[in-house]
Every structure is written in C-alpha cells, then in structure tokens.
Image (spheres, grey):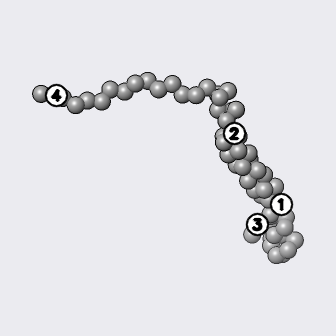
Amino acid sequence: VLQPGVSGEPVEGASLRTLIKDPYILLAAGAISFGNVGIAMLEPSLPIWMMSTMGASEFQT
C-alpha cells in the first residue's frame, strides 16, 4: 500500500543584487518612500499649525 508523503526541496531565493535590479521592486520602494515623505514633513509641523490656527494650548496639541 502506498503511503503518500510530502518531501520538501530546498528553495534558493534570489540574490540581493537581482532584487535591487527588479523594476517592480524599485517602483514599490519608490512609492513607499514618496508616500512617507509627506507624513514626515507633516508630523512636526502639525502641532505648530494647530496652535496658531485653532488656538490650542500646548496640552491640547
């Protein structure tokens, strides 16, 4: 009687150089970086804007 079984083969991943050259990975990394730039610029200036526009005290910002 046959006994079904699964034997795994070692899978070798792509090298870092290959991944860096991949245009889709470059596009995704660029989009993520570009999206974070806006958040990084907004985060330190938001409390200052709230204090001047909304009249918020330091505790409320």
The residue that label 1 is drawn on is 45
Q: Do the residues bearing badges 3 and 4 touch, measured as CB atoms within 8 Å? A: no
Name the residue: 76% across, 50% down: 34
In terms of sequence position, does the residue under pointer 2 or pointer 4 come before the other? 4
On-image quarter of the C terminus: bottom right
Q: Residue furthest bottom?
A: 54
Tell me the SS state at disc 3: loop
In terms of sequence position, does the residue under pointer 1 or pointer 2 come before the other? 2
In terms of sequence position, does the residue under pointer 3 or pointer 4 come before the other? 4
C-alpha gap between disc 1 and disc 4: 69 Å
**In x, y percent, where is residue 19?**
64, 32
**Amino acid type assigned to the residue bearing label 3 in the image:** Thr
Question: Which labelled disc corresponds to residue 2?
Answer: 4
Q: Do the residues bearing badges 1 and 4 touch, measured as CB atoms within 8 Å? A: no
Q: Residues within 10 Å of mark 3 (few under 14, many from 20)?
A: few
Name the residue: 81% across, 55% down: 41
Tell me the SS state at disc 4: loop
On-image quarter of the N terminus: top left
Q: Nearer the viewer, residue 39 or 61?
A: 39
C-alpha gap between disc 3 and disc 4: 70 Å
Question: Which labelled disc corresponds to residue 19?
Answer: none
The residue that label 3 is drawn on is 61
**In x, y percent, where is residue 37?**
78, 52
C-alpha gap between disc 2 and disc 3: 42 Å
Question: Which labelled disc corresponds to residue 23?
Answer: 2
**In x, y percent, where is residue 11?**
47, 26
**Amino acid type assigned to the residue bearing label 2 in the image:** Pro
**Amino acid type assigned to the residue bearing label 4 in the image:** Leu
